[in-house]
Amino acid sequence: MNTIRSTGLATLLLLFMACKPLERAPQSDPDLTLSVDSFPFGGDLTLVDHNGNLFHLADHQRPFLLFFGYASCPDACPQTMARLASAYTILGEDARDLRTLFVSVDPERDSPEMLKSYLSYFDVPAIGLTGVQDSIDAVVKRYAAHYEIGEQGSAAGYLIDHSLYTYLIDQNGDLRFFFRPSHTAEEIATVVRQLSR
């Protein structure tokens, strides 16, 4: 992805951030350069983690990957978590401080206990985050993300259309890159390694 250096360009890019089927996702950009400046969105958040404790992003001076999803998601979420697991494997020791934040857009069903159980299936050092609807919506808005609850009708209940981007946050809490579904585990690792340079 090209380095974002202006608010105008970043705003334009946000028009593409609604959830799309994976097969229609744009191709990876050849330029995997970490943004020198933080993006004009993102920032601190306070939610409840999967152990039932308050989580303040500002309290943690470490890099994070952040993804919006939900435990009943049938495809995009497990695919993303599997790709992140591969990226962690590639990174090895370079990922020792990196954690993943899985922010639920389904607080009605995703209790801390549910998120803890769900995330245990993936080989990713992840922290599940949930909270009251207003708190979730505030974080979604802050990160220029999107979700929409669909109609009831599947065996799992309602489905949720949601943004598929994974955000890279540096140790200062600044948003430095966002990955599309088309970015590979190798590309994710390439960008993450730039944080330690």
Image (cartoon, rainbow, N blue to C red):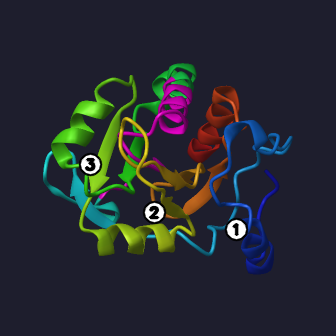
Residue at image coords 74%, 71%:
10
Q: Amino acid at mark 3?
A: Asp
Name the secondary structure under disc 3.
Answer: loop
**Relative image position of residue 91 (x, y in whole percent):** 55, 26
Q: In front: 171, or 116?
A: 116
Instruction: Specify few, some or many for label 1: CA neighbours under 10 Å numbering under 14, 14-19, or 20 or more.
Output: few
Residue 171 seen in render: yes
> Disc 2 vs disc 1: Cβ atoms closer than 8 Å?
no
**Relative image position of residue 34 (x, y in whole percent):** 70, 51
Say which of marks 2 and 1 sits in front. 1
> Disc 2 vs disc 3: Cβ atoms closer than 8 Å?
no
What residue would you read off at disc 1?
Answer: 14
On screen, 114 above or below 79?
A: below
Q: Residue 110, labelled with which disc?
A: 3
Q: N-terminal of the two: label 2 or label 1? A: 1
Q: In front: 172, or 16?
A: 16
Q: In front: 74, or 102?
A: 74
